[in-house]
Image (cartoon, rainbow, N blue to C red):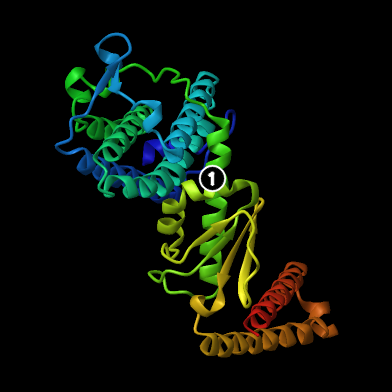
Amino acid sequence: ALRFTLLTGGTPGNDMKLSTTRVEANRNFANKIWNAARFVLMALAGAPMELAQTGDSHAVTYALPDPAHLILADRWILSRLETVRENVTRLVGDWQLGEAGRQLYDFLWSEYCDWYIEAAKNRLYGGDAAAAQATRQVLAFVLEQSMRLMHPYMPFVTEAIWNHLPGVAAAGEALMTSRWPASSGLADATAEEQFGRLQEMIRAVRNARSEYNVEPGRRVAALIAAGEHTSLVQANVDLLVSQAKIEGESLQVAAELAPPEKAVALAVGGVTLYLPLAGLVDMDAERKRLQKEVESVEQQIARIDGLLGNEGFLAKAPEQVVGREKAKLEELRGRRVQLQANLADLG
């Protein structure tokens, strides 16, 4: 964590103020990588992992499945890995170690761990042996290649993980003697665009769930008017159901759908998701909660209005304090508008 902080925390030509907060954050990053590796290793346990060699014994990695067995999530993560590999190779060559490390951080935490591993669970435990094995090969390939890219930043953590990878570690002496990842040729702009659209849809549903205080484990009903993206959505229903906590049995997907009454409408990149409020919240309890919050917000608005209308306060208070109160007032007014819109949705 300290090494990663030192390598990524400064800019060329400038002194760096070491932040213990950043060291702690990067310790959490190391823990995230370690826990992700543990999950992958458990998924690989006992499976016949196929290897591929692109040169000498120091260039052994995991073989990728036949392209016909790759689903959208696979093509997306492999494309993102190739993009990051290319960027990191260029940045390290230009001594831009901070930016290279930031891109690796974002890729491993926000894409591999938060999205691909979660999506992979559907196929790993779905009962289809061929699909599960294809997913294992992709999980292992991305992890192994990522450890090579991360090795200059976190040599001890990455070496420890790499030496537990079945098959690969036995083919070479150590991660530090392995080759820097070569181009896979798997950059796929279409896969990135399509998976990005699904991510936006999932985030929109998650935000709506948060806005309406839906219990984390509760599944919600949904209707999706997907337009020209209907085939994309239909092919990835399992991802939407698992990651957005949608009721799979009642989910409707079509090019066009009549908007249901009393439903939250979420417009995302040419797709509209409808979440019927009756299945989303307890209508009476939610009305009471929202009304209570509106009253609280209005009281805060009245207090700040009175404060900013007081000439004595404006004359004596520092400029930054006045500015902070004005910003808080605008935020509260925006919150009131949102709450009133939610109340109107409930009817």
Residue reaching furthest left?
Answer: 46
Locate residue 102 relative to residue 123 in the image: left or right. Answer: right
Type of the residue with mark 1: Leu
The image quadrant of residue 50 is top left
Q: Position of residue 201 (x, y in %)?
A: 56, 55
Which residue does the image show at 54% across and 75% down from the upper left?
Answer: 212
**Quarter that holds the C terminus:** bottom right
| 264 vs 9, nearest the viewer | 264
Which residue does the image show at 76% across and 69% down from the upper left?
Answer: 323
Q: Secondary structure at mark 1?
A: helix
Locate residue 111 relative to residue 173 in the image: left or right. Answer: right
**Quarter that holds the N terminus:** top left
| 314 vs 303, nearest the viewer | 303
Which residue does the image show at 36% across and 32% down from the upper left?
Answer: 69
Count up the numbered dots. Answer: 1
Q: Position of residue 164 (x, y in %)?
A: 19, 33
Q: Give the residue at mark 1.
A: 232
Position of 312 relative to 181 (above/below) = below
Residue 214 visible to the viewer: yes
Q: Position of residue 162 (x, y in %)?
A: 25, 30
The image quadrant of residue 223 is bottom right
Badge 1: few (under 14), some or many (20 or more) residues near its Cα, within 10 Å? Answer: some
Which residue does the image show at 63% across and 67% down from the upper left?
Answer: 265
Residue 15 visible to the viewer: no
Position of 149 relative to 226 (above/below) = above
The image quadrant of residue 146 is top left
Q: Position of residue 192 (x, y in %)?
A: 54, 37
Locate residue 306 relative to residue 271 in the image: left or right. Answer: right
| 65 vs 324, nearest the viewer | 65
Position of 345 relative to 202 (above/below) = below
